[in-house]
Image (cartoon, rainbow, N blue to C red):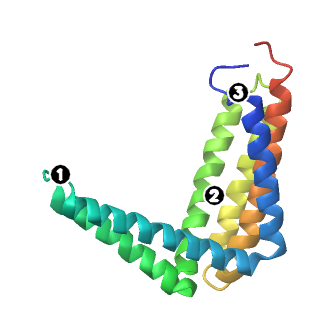
Amino acid sequence: MSNNTPSRGWLLFGGVLSIITGILAVIVPGMFGYILTALIGALCLVSGGVGLFQALFGKDSAHRALSALSAALRFAAGAALFFFTDSGMLTLTLILAATFVVEGIFCVVTSLRMRSNPAWFWLLLNGIVAAILGWMIFSKWPMDSEWVIGVLYGIQALFSGVAMIMLALASKSEPA
């Protein structure tokens, strides 16, 4: 297996986990969108709180003001996402669209660089699907924000999972 390819076991694990997540997201897209938005908000709240505590009470005082400002911004973003989930979903929908477009471009470029791998086509297909889904999200924003995170993220997670599994299965046949 190539030195820049993750181990077969991790690819299989990640692929299966991605497929399970994708199925759940497609089955209950609205709930998945709310849960994801609230979870990201909670993580930002915790991160901002810890960062603020470190900035105020930490031993390193060289960048205390910048650290406190950064932590306060994370905390504020987390509060906005957690307590105003509907508005947060609108923002996350735009971020998801941009992420899919960028991930799609990177996957296409990466797949073209690894055409010697028998599963390169699956990575190419994953990249194309990601880019198309990203543009679909942009075209329907903001009216479809409630369900779009769940459904389109679920579809992307399914394709990503299949691509990882195919890469794992193809890596079995490559010389060590």
Mark closer to the chain start, 1 or 2: 1
Tag in front: 1 or 3: 1
User: What is the crowding at mark 1: few (fewer than 14 residues within 10 Å), some, or many (at least 20)?
Assistant: few
The residue singled out by tag 1 in the image is: 59
Q: Secondary structure at mark 1?
A: loop
Measured as percent of width and height from the top left, residue 151 is found at 77, 71
Query: As shown in the figure, which amino acid type bears the numbered disc 3?
Result: Met
Q: Which of the pair 131/58 is nearer the observer? A: 58
The residue singled out by tag 2 in the image is: 100
Q: Which of the pair 146/120 is nearer the observer? A: 146
| Label 1 with label 3: CB-CB less than 8 Å | no
Query: Gap between marks 1 and 3, in whole Å?
Result: 47 Å
Q: Secondary structure at mark 3?
A: loop
Kindly identify the residue that appears in the image at 23 percent across and 65 percent down: 68
Query: As shown in the figure, which amino acid type bears the numbered disc 2?
Result: Phe
Mark closer to the chain start, 2 or 3: 2
Q: Is residue 140 visible?
A: no
Q: Quadrant of residue 115?
A: top right
Measured as percent of width and height from the top left, residue 46 is found at 43, 68
The residue singled out by tag 3 in the image is: 114
Q: Is residue 110 visible?
A: yes
